[in-house]
Image: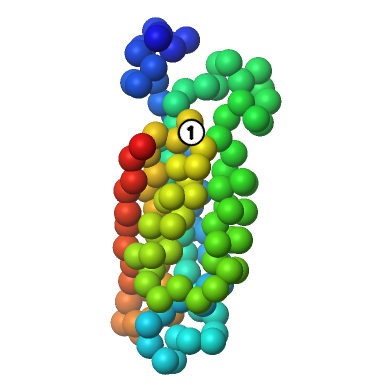
Amino acid sequence: MQALTGLPKELALYRIFVRDLVLLAEVGVYDSEKNRQQRIRLNIELDCEDTIAGAGDRIDGVVCYFGVVERIKAMLAERHINLIETVADRAAALCLHDARVVEARVTVEKLDVLESAASVGVTVARRR
């Protein structure tokens, strides 16, 4: 199937992103991190099947970054998570719930862990 751009469907992509989203989350393996929230920063990039031309300028025709953020906030509110790797993996999986998302890259950083570093973190990439 040819996309409207003339490229094969699998090559016609667009990328949405959320940069520097700072949220509070209960995350960490150490006792000092239990039962308290700490700041984390997320950066999310989603490569999506190019549906822009056919979307008719309607939000339901494209992947909605607001919906992605709300799903991640709900996941973080559910319970304590030990590892930021788990946060990144679960966030990427939530992004892939939309069948138009081909690949999700999620970076999660703890902002207040090491006094001598701006952040510590992890990036995961998940492909459909």
Image quarter (top left, top right, bottom left or bottom right) of the C terminus: top left
Q: How is the image coloured?
A: rainbow
Residue 1 showing in the rendered view:
yes
For residue 86, side relative to residue 23 (left or right) = left
Which residue has dot 1 on it?
A: 99
- At x 41%, y 72%, the residue is 110
The vertical placement of 54 against 35, above or below, is above
Image quarter (top left, top right, bottom left or bottom right) of the N terminus: top left
- What SS does tag 1 mark? loop
- At x 48%, y 33%, the residue is 99
Residue 92 location (% of width, % of height): 42, 51
Q: Amino acid at mark 1?
A: Ala
For residue 20, side relative to residue 113 (left or right) = right
Quadrant assignment, res 64: top right
Q: Residue pushed farthest bottom?
A: 31
Looking at the picture, tell me which residue is in the foreground, 12 or 76. 76
The vertical placement of 70 against 59, above or below, is below
Q: Residues within 10 Å of mark 1 (few under 14, many from 20)?
A: few
Residue 43 showing in the rendered view:
no
Residue 72 location (% of width, % of height): 54, 57
- At x 55%, y 62%, the residue is 75
Looking at the picture, tell me which residue is in the foreground, 65 or 88. 88
Quadrant assignment, res 12: top left
